[in-house]
Image (tube, helix red, strand yellow):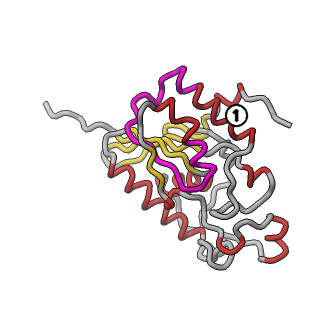
């Protein structure tokens, strides 16, 4: 009898609420300053859930983007994953904003035209930044590479809403590089992909049941 190869699972966790998001700042490498107090509480709630349920006990690899909000989220949830080393990778970052990094979004609107990625997906967010089509290609290549590296394993990735969005475009085979889904991916929500026999299945999106335990913070 031929044994069936184990499927590969990518578990994408959006970071907790970021300080830059709460303050309306473009949060690239310069603008990101980690999590807000609410973001910390959200990540702690996810850790408590996973410690209680053991649902990520089978994870064998752990990744995060290099942005502080993703790294801080990863460090908070790490105890629920056992003794896994954290690998950081800039290719798991949110779309790189370019020279607008660190501006407020109000300042951005005064200086730069608002990009319409559906009409012009090859236009960068601001000079020196990344286009939507370039971002999609980066995320698609990176997530597939991670899956290949850990074939048959479960990998947890602390990342960003844009990365989750791009994974849906890439793995569901949506039409073109201008596709940008109008999603409300919640902070610390779980999106899980399974790859089996070369095919991707979306097992869950925006699983944020643990956030019911997080009180709103003033």
Q: Nearer the viewer, residue 5 or 109?
A: 109
Horizontal side, residue 25 vs residue 142: left or right: right
Mark 1, residue position: 41
* Furthest residue toward bottom: 127
Range of the magenta residues?
49-74
Q: Residue furthest top?
A: 52
Question: Is residue 42 inside the magenta stretch?
Answer: no
Quadrant in which the N terminus appears: top left
Location of residue 94 with respect to 14 vertically, above or below? below
**Residue at (45, 45) in percent of width and height:** 86
Image quarter in which the C terminus is found: top right
Q: Nearer the viewer, residue 206 or 72?
A: 72
Res. 93 image quadrant: bottom right
Q: Secondary structure at mark 1?
A: helix
Vertical order, 107 against 64 (above or below): below
Relative to residue 145, is residue 46 depicted above or below? Answer: above
Assess disc 1: are there few (<14), some (14-19) or many (≥20) residues with their C-alpha within 10 Å of its C-alpha: many
At a point 68% along the width and 35% down the height, the residue shown is: 42
- Vertical order, 77 against 28 (above or below): above
Please report the residue visible at 56 percent of the width from the left and 50 percent of the height from the top.
159
Q: Quadrant of residue 46?
A: top right
Q: Residue at x 76, y 72 (%)?
A: 114
Could you say where residue 133 lies in the image, as x and y percent from the top left? 55, 69
User: Could you tell me residue 103's position as x and y percent?
Assistant: 77, 67
Q: Position of residue 163 (x, y in %)?
A: 56, 54
Position in image of residue 184 (x %, y %): 69, 47
Instruction: Please state if 193 lies on the left or on the right of 216 as rendered.
Output: left
Of 215 and 72, the residue lying toward us: 72
């Amino acid at each position: 009898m031929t044994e069936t190869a184990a499927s590969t699972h990518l578990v994408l966790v959006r970071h907790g609420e970021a300080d830059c998001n709460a303050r309306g700042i473009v949060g690239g490498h310069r603008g990101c300053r980690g999590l807000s107090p609410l973001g910390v509480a959200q990540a702690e709630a996810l850790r408590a859930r996973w410690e209680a349920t053991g649902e990520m006990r089978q994870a064998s690899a752990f990744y995060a983007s290099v942005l502080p909000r993703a790294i801080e989220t990863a460090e908070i949830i790490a105890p629920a994953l056992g003794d896994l080393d954290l690998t950081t990778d800039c290719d798991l970052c949110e779309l790189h904003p370019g020279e607008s990094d660190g501006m407020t979004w109000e300042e951005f609107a005064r200086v730069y035209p608002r990009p319409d990625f559906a009409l012009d997906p090859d236009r960068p967010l601001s000079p020196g930044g990344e286009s939507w089509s370039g971002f999609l290609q980066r995320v698609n290549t990176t997530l597939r590479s991670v899956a290949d590296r850990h074939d048959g394993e479960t990998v947890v990735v602390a990342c960003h809403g844009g990365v989750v969005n791009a994974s849906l475009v890439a793995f569901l085979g949506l039409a073109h590089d201008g596709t940008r889904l109008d999603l409300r991916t919640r902070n610390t929500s779980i999106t899980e992909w399974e790859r089996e026999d070369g095919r991707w299945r979306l097992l869950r999106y925006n699983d944020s049941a643990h956030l019911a335990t997080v009180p709103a913070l003033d």
